[in-house]
Image (tube, coloured by chain):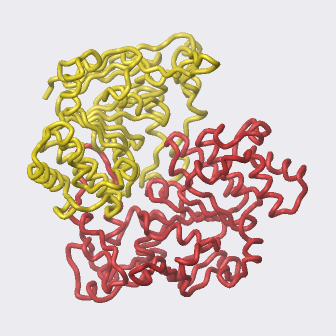
Chain colours: A yellow, B red
Amino acid sequence: MNETLLQVSALTKHFPILAGFFSRPVAWVKAVDNVNFEVHRGETLGIVGESGCGKTTLVNVLLNLMKPTAGKVIFDSIDLYSCSKKELRELRQHLQIVFQDPFWSLNPRWLVKDIVAEPLNVHLKLKPDETIKRVEELLDMVGLPKDAVFKSPHEFSGGQRQRIAIARALALNPKLLVLDEPTSAIDIFSQAQILELLKDLKERLNLTYILISHDLSVVHHMSDKIMVMYLGEVVEYGAADDIFNRPAHPYTKALLNAIPDINTESLDEINELKGNVPSAVNPPAGCRFNTRCSEVMDFCAGKKPLASDIGSGHTASCHLL
Amino acid sequence: MKNYFEIENLKVDYKTYEGEKNVLDLEHFVLEKGKTFGLVGESGAGKSVLAQTILGILSRPPGIIKSGKILFDGEDLLSKSEKELRRIRGKRISMIFQDPMSTLNPVFTVGTQITRVIRQNQGVNKKEAFKRAVEKIELVKISDAADIMEAYPHELSGGQRQRIIIAIALSCDAELLIADEPTRNLDVTIQAGILKLIAKLQKELNVSVLFIANNLGLASATCDHLAMLHEGKIIEKGTTKEVLHNPRHPYTKAFIEAIPKDKNHKIHLEQIAKNNGTSLNSAGCPNINLCLETEEKCQEHIPMLKQFQGTHWVACHRVQENKEVNL
């Protein structure tokens, strides 16, 4: 249980802004900046943050869909960026992803059997009847009927499509499944079903999840650990209950304070965060949150806060602590 | 006292290959002046069809308005001609659309788009319209209004765009505002600001708001009254407190149950899973699969919306017989 499956150290991804005749970089978008964390086997790590905070870039880099600017990712004791092509191909079987919008992530011209069987065809080269058997098994696992095999994606609702995407991601028995906003495009009842399905699959198949979402209630429902990101940096990390019950960073507090639930009786009980997310090209000096922080002090803009441990692995980067 | 905004027996059908499907069947509801009325339901419940019907922008075909009245300030909107409607739309009834990314036209500046609405509805000259547009932009708390007037939509952030859409919706001092999931594509950190802005303007200008939501938390924070919409019918309505803190209808109960809570909470899905009855006008209660105990009646008749207590109305046979509904 406590074995480390994924270890990320000093991961950085900067995108160049090219300009001029020779397309020279004139500036850099600091999408992910010096991110460190680890995920243990069997754990769910929830990543939250506003749009533009680097969640999706982080995932793309983690899955080696993009090369990082700097940093190291060790997955199952193999370095993801310095391993050979053959090793990487092997590794990819164990790193799978479920994308945000099932209306875009499934090829509308393919049958469900082709969609779900694609990873099998690429990696395992099974015989046709074995492939079909495996596809049926996978569809059963995600709660779709057998006759779904010969249907096209358009015959399914959003929730069912997301099940197809999950079946595809599970085809190769991955160790780590990345869920990039898995329920943001579907209805509340489908969402409830997908979340419970994911929880159930995790138990049965001994999976590890990285869940990205902007919906804090979804993250709270699913995660063991939570990582809060702001402008490409991790501002707070800790056990889910610690983050929700004892948030330490002003940004986390602001996030939690902004969502109404069914016990919220008036708008006075929730608060917005003032201002917009600053540009990631020129992030504010010092603490990146200092331009919007309600508890900002004089030296916040001058000095960068380091992550400090406030008990049982709960860390936050703020001068207040 | 005359009701400010009232819907009576409104029935809207959609033509499909399998026959006409009823998408909206509202017996009666009233929106009081200056209040916020929330409509909550899944996608496909008919929320947006209602908004479109009120504004007279429902595409027909496939939509067919079968019967009913939409009374606005004593006049029936459904009997108005297109020309008369054009004087009401934008000027007296206005709408905030849900997607700030696609509502604004990308090839015109924000200023052009706001002044166009103002000139169309208020018949003022360019200079005056520009002045009023700047005022409206300042009203929605965007500081450098003059610069924003020159900006194209892609130069603005999501929150700013949504504010501009609100500014356009309010640019002609509408009395009734239809807000169709106004914060759907926005970050939670901006959401509260937008909702507060709508509430503040509502108070200042005494606007009534029809708030369409698919999130009970938002509805809870903003609405005075709430109606749960399922397959085109209101199945429970009352004050926000009554509906959310003392839900009676099985569908409302299931809707609240389906909200994810914390790690130790398991959503009970057995019933929810069965609730996918998209039936073409079948008899019986459409929510029958949600209930543990059912009556013969539930199989045969669709329950009507009846008064439960005071302002709390529920469409369920068992509730109407004072029996408990269990999921």
The image quadrant that residue B288 belongs to is: bottom left
Which one is nearer the viewer's eye here, A300 or B239?
A: A300
Kindly tell me whether residue A242 is visible in this rendering: yes
| Residue in the image at 23% along x and 58% along y | B268
Q: Residue at x 42, y 73 (%)?
A: B236
Measured as percent of width and height from the top left, residue A214 is found at: 42, 41
| Rendering quarter of residue B282 | bottom left
Query: Residue B97, position in %: x, y?
Result: 59, 58
Q: Nearer the viewer, residue A200 or A168?
A: A168
Establish if A111 lies above or below B59. above
How many numbered tags mark residues here? 0
Apparent side of residue A321 relative to residue A176 in the rendered image (left or right):
right
Question: Residue sitting at 56 percent across and 52 percent down?
Answer: B99
Q: In this view, does A217 lie to the left or right of B34?
A: left
Q: Quadrant of the N terminus of chain A?
A: top left
| Corner quadrant of residue B51 | bottom right
Question: Measured along the vertical axis of the image, is residue A146 above or below residue A124?
Answer: below
Instruction: Measuring from the top left, give residue A47's x and y in whole percent.
Output: 36, 33
Q: Which of B229 and A138 is in front in this view?
A: A138
A246 relative to B216, above or below = above
Quarter the C terminus of chain A occupies = top left
